[in-house]
Image: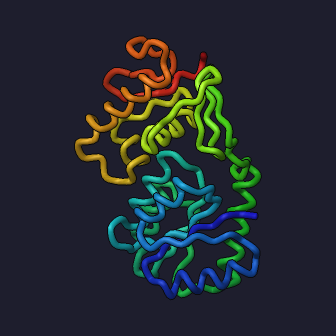
Amino acid sequence: MANILICDDERDIVSALKIYLSSEGYTLYEAYTGREALDIVRKHEIHLILMDIMMPEMDGIAATAKLREEYNIPIILLTAKSEDTDKVLGLNIGADDYITKPFNPIEVLARVRSQLRRYTALGGMEQRPSKLVIGGIVLDDDTKSVTVDGEPVSLTPIEYNILLLLMRHPGRVYSSAQIYEQVWNEAAFGSEGAVAVHIRHLREKLEITPSEPRYLKVVWGLGYKMEPNN
């Protein structure tokens, strides 16, 4: 069954939507700012998001744009009639649909079902594998353990989450700012030094020769990637 995130700064609206959707057997998560929504998506397998446009800290437009950098999860915007311009902007940056407040429960359920059918047809609800293997590195996300050539490696939580991010997307280049925002869940002001330090520590623990890494590669001027062909 699908996992749905409801994000709105008005708790009464979140509660009402939970009532509409709970009868369908969905697993429901809730957030009250765009930043909270990003944090939940990074920590849980979310299959659809109901996203309010007007919220504090990070609004729904900014959160949608950020999510579209990495995820293809269906996003349905929750809009007021006066937000037509924002509605169009949201659709242009990657939102899939919108529902205008006040909600009709039947319409909410119909639009949610429609987007989930599309997402399922595209293979979007396939579960991420818990065990990732690249060369001699094995990361088991169920047990939060890492081994290199069969030997256990002790990583800090930050090191583990950086490695998990890179191993989930082998060959993809992540800038220091992208790594910082996804692992630390904070704005990436002056993040290069912190990320570089943790990458160096990871190399020391994972690589036979840290100065000539086989796995954790620098793409000069762009960022870091996990080399997939090992």
Q: Is residue 166 left or right of residue 115?
A: left
Q: In this view of the protein, which residue sits in the foreground, 207 or 170?
A: 207
Residue 111: quadrant of the picture: bottom right
Instruction: Farthest residue to the left: give it.
Output: 190
Residue 117 spot, x, y in % from top left: 75, 60
Q: Is residue 79 left or right of residue 193?
A: right
Considering the image in quadrants, where does the C terminus appear?
A: top right
Q: Residue at x 51, y 26 (%)?
A: 226
Residue 1 spot, x, y in % from top left: 76, 64
Q: In this view of the protein, which residue sits in the foreground, 7 or 72?
A: 7
Residue 69 spot, x, y in % from top left: 47, 46
Q: Residue at x 68, y 37 (%)?
A: 131
Q: In this view of the protein, which residue sits in the foreground, 80 or 12?
A: 12
Residue 5: quadrant of the picture: bottom right
Q: Residue at x 70, y 76 (%)?
A: 109
Residue 148 spot, x, y in % from top left: 58, 24
> Above or below — where is 69 with respect to 220?
below
Query: Could you tell me how many numbered marks the image carries?
Result: 0
> Above or below — where is 139 with respect to 36?
above
Describe the colour scheme in one phrase. rainbow
> Above or below — where is 42 with respect to 51?
above
Q: Residue at x 58, y 34 (%)?
A: 146
